[in-house]
Image: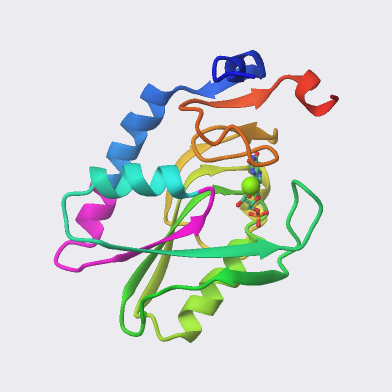
Amino acid sequence: MDAADISADLEHVLYTADQIEARVKELAAQIDAEYEGRQPLLVGVLNGAMIIMSDLCRAMHGHVEVDWMAISSYGSGTHSSGVVRILKDLTSDIAGRDVLVVEDIIDTGLTLSYLVHNLLTRGAASVKVATMFRKPEAVHAPVEVSYVGFDLPDEFVVGYGLDYDGRYRNLRDVATLAPHVYHH
Ligand code: XMP
Ligand code: MG
């Protein structure tokens, strides 16, 4: 098994690394403009947000701070239930802070909705959400998403931080997996 094997597992590339990079720059400029004169705390949700967080914060020109949470939502493999357990909490006190949650993908938005409410109860001045990808189900999400990179069809995708069974996060494109990957 070597690194070159990854691309053999892909079916369709939905967004290329170049498209993603260009879109991240646009989002960063928009966020910079809206937070001008403030210093947002970017809160990444591990592990999926690791890639978008590092790209987004480096594309921004204003001051930011970064913190992380790890949460697990109870549910079957690819779908979340909205019942959430915090596995790793923030290190920062967010009282009075402008928090921007940075997500890789929003599907039902249930996990995110829990998170936003949780952060608001800690006294954050504001809590907004940025996500690189959004699935169609997200239209019903009980949470407002201020910044969206790309909309995706209702297919399971990997790459740019998104995983299947822990793998494929390091793909630079976002793609669907070939059927043989699911039936081995
Ligand atoms: P909800 O439904 O709470 O769930 O918005 C968001 C979480 O679901 C996972 N998810 C995916 N992960 N490819 C993935 O690798 C996908 O296509 C996908 N759709 C949903 C993901 O963990 C996200 O945080
Ligand atoms: Mg995942």
Image quarter hosting the C terminus: top right
**In the image, is residue 37 above or below residue 75?**
below
**In the image, is residue 105 above or below residue 95?**
above
Residue drawn at 62 percent across, 42 percent down = 135
Residue drawn at 52 percent across, 71 percent down = 116
**In the image, is residue 39 above or below residue 44?**
below
Image position of 154 (left or right of 34): right
Figure colour scheme = rainbow
Image position of 110 (left or right of 128): right
Residue at the outermost front position: 1
The quarter holding residue 70 reads bottom right
Depth check, front residue: 168 or 59: 168
Residue drawn at 80 percent across, 28 percent down = 182
| Residue 61 included in the magenta stretch of the image | no
Question: What's drawn in magenta, residue-wise?
Answer: 29-48
Q: Where is residue 99 in the image (x, y as percent from the top left)?
A: 36, 69
Q: Position of residue 168 (x, y in %)?
A: 59, 32
Q: Where is residue 31 in the image (x, y as percent from the top left)?
A: 28, 53
The quarter holding residue 73 reads bottom right
Depth check, front residue: 6 or 29: 6
| Total numbered badges shown on the rendered structure | 0
Residue drawn at 46 percent across, 27 percent down = 172
**In the image, is residue 160 above or below residue 91?**
above
Image quarter hosting the N terminus: top right
Image position of 128 (left or right of 5): left
Q: Can residue 143 be seen in this view?
A: no
Q: Can residue 64 be seen in this view?
A: yes
